[in-house]
Image (cartoon, rainbow, N blue to C red):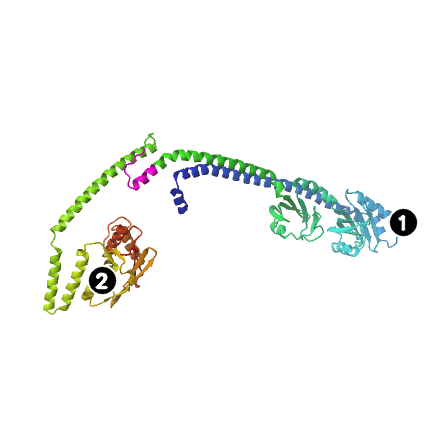
Amino acid sequence: MHNIRFKFLSIGMSRKLVIIFVFMLIIPITISAIVSYNYYRKSIEQNTADYVSQTSLEVLNRIEDYIEDMRMITKIPMYSSELQSYIASPENGLEKDSRIDFFIRLMSDMKKGTNAVYIFDNYGNTFYRNSLDGNNKEIATHYDRLKQIARDHSGSAVLINTQAATTASGKTKYVLTMVRDIIDLTTYKPVGFVAVETDLSAVEAYFKHLDQITGGKTTIVDNENNVIFDSAYENISSSWTDLESIEKSQQDSGNFHINQKGEQYYAIYLTSQKLGWKVYVYVKTKELFSKATKVRNSTLIITSAILLVTLISSVFISLAVTKPLRALTRLMKKVQEGDFTVSFPVRFSDEVGILGLHFNRMIKRIDELIKDVQAASYRKQEAEMEALQAQINPHFIYNTLETLRMKALLNEDREVSQMSLFLGKLLRYSIIQGREIVTVKQEIEHLTNYIKLQNYRFENRFHLQNHIDSKLENYSMIKLVFQPIVENAIFHGLESRSGQGTIIISSKVEGDVCYFTFEDDGIGMSPELVSQLNNRIQLGNANESGNRVTGSGIGLKNVNERIKLHFGAKYGLFVYSELGKGAMVQLKLPFIES
């Protein structure tokens, strides 16, 4: 989030204004369109679910009543002793057939939609009446199974779910069958059983209108997931294989979305408490949300048009508003290049005009201050020159050191003589050299003299290993760079450890950049101290909070500042260290051949 904010604040003012104008309009419009579309979509879903649920409930109630009427029809033989006596008799005749047919006709006419009524006696005889396409010729072959089902329920009516049946003409139809034992009222023993049969046209008639409205399909399954009815006539009388629908319909009623054969459906389901059947009504999502899709497309078109107009308008407005700011920016760039003669033309007294007026005053003041600083700098240089001329002639110091060295030789004090010699060379290099630019070879010689002088003091505890490529001996650099780095390593790393310490100097050249690396095996520094030291080196004598600091790193800081003043901000030095593992200083300089 911080990066996004930083990038936004970094872009031009005209682009910011365009982005702000666009987002101020497009975001509210888009949010409003999305919310409205989702609300409209959910409203359609809810209204459809309510309508389908209410309609399906009414249909279920009618089917429940229809099944209950079939159940009542199967009770008629229970109340006719005459019919029971004919069924119980093993003899067959015209009178028996005529009377049983009378009762069957009576039962068939009691409920519209009843296709067939069958009465079976215990002797394997079948008596029936079919109002459509002849009898179900398969029902006689199921005599034993139907009889067993009727016997298992001891006089109670049993509904046999949808089955495929073949008529006398060879056609296949799907039927529901209600069977019941016919119990003799005197002996309370079954004398036969009755079967009332109806095809699915009655059920289909209830759901046909609903499917036409929804553009979908309807499926009814029992509590064992056997298909009772399928308006597409694909799975009737078989086990339901739509596991996803089963998984999503664990409650008594509800709705869900589902994909079937590449088509999206919105499914509404509810359960019949009397029959245990579950009705699924699948509404095509494409048909359901066709109006919502039109609303969404219209909204997108309107939103796009508004965005285009807003974008074009915001571009013109932002260019007009930021034009004087861009002009002021160009003038600032000229000032940055050193041109202090520029002036911003102030035409209006608005914020930009006030800013331009103050800009002109500021440039005038800066020009005056630069001239004052230049004059002061010239006067300071003159004063420093006079002060240098007033100092004791450095040759007096060197001559004195030489006299001390000769005196030490006469007194056979070789160490004092050598120390005086090295100290004289150090002073001569740092003061008398007369120029700032030296070669790597001269810098190494100066560093070697410094190490020798320190070893007199610390009894040869420091060992310098020079791995600088000999090809770099004529490489040009500013003087007094190596010695402060090694001095810092001795006094803050090697002096505090016991035994001999080693300093390794190496080099490498990459393109137009030369790297010098100084590694020591001193006590090292903690990550916090390394961070503070690098901040001190890079920020000068001020720490991150702006306070003055003292201590280690002053020599390194001075070296870093001199390098940047001579060669540019991308050059300098950096310190790496781990506690107990020594330290490393990497020096980055431009590759300049002498």
Q: Is residue 33 visible?
A: yes
- Tell me residue 547's x, y (percent): 25, 49
Element type where label 2 sits in the image:
helix
Give the amino acid at mark 1.
Answer: Leu
Report the amino acid beneath label 2: Glu
Q: Is residue 468 visible?
A: no
**Residue 94 tag number:** 1
Earlier-in-chain disc, 1 versus 2: 1
Q: Which part of the image, by quadrant, shows the C terminus?
A: bottom left
User: Percent x, y for residue 429?
Assistant: 19, 58
The quarter of the picture where residue 328 lies is top left
- Residue drawn 34% across the image and 33% down it: 352
Q: Position of residue 167 (x, y in %)?
A: 80, 49
Query: Which of the 4 quarters of the picture holds residue 141?
Result: bottom right
**x and y, in percent, of residue 589 in the image:** 29, 55
The residue carrying pointer 1 sits among few (fewer than 14), some (14 to 19) or many (20 or more) residues within 10 Å by Cα, namely few
The residue range painted magenta reads 328-344
In this view, the mark in front (1 or 2): 2
**What is the number of the mark on residue 445?**
2
- Give whichever of 376, 528 is nearer the camera: 376
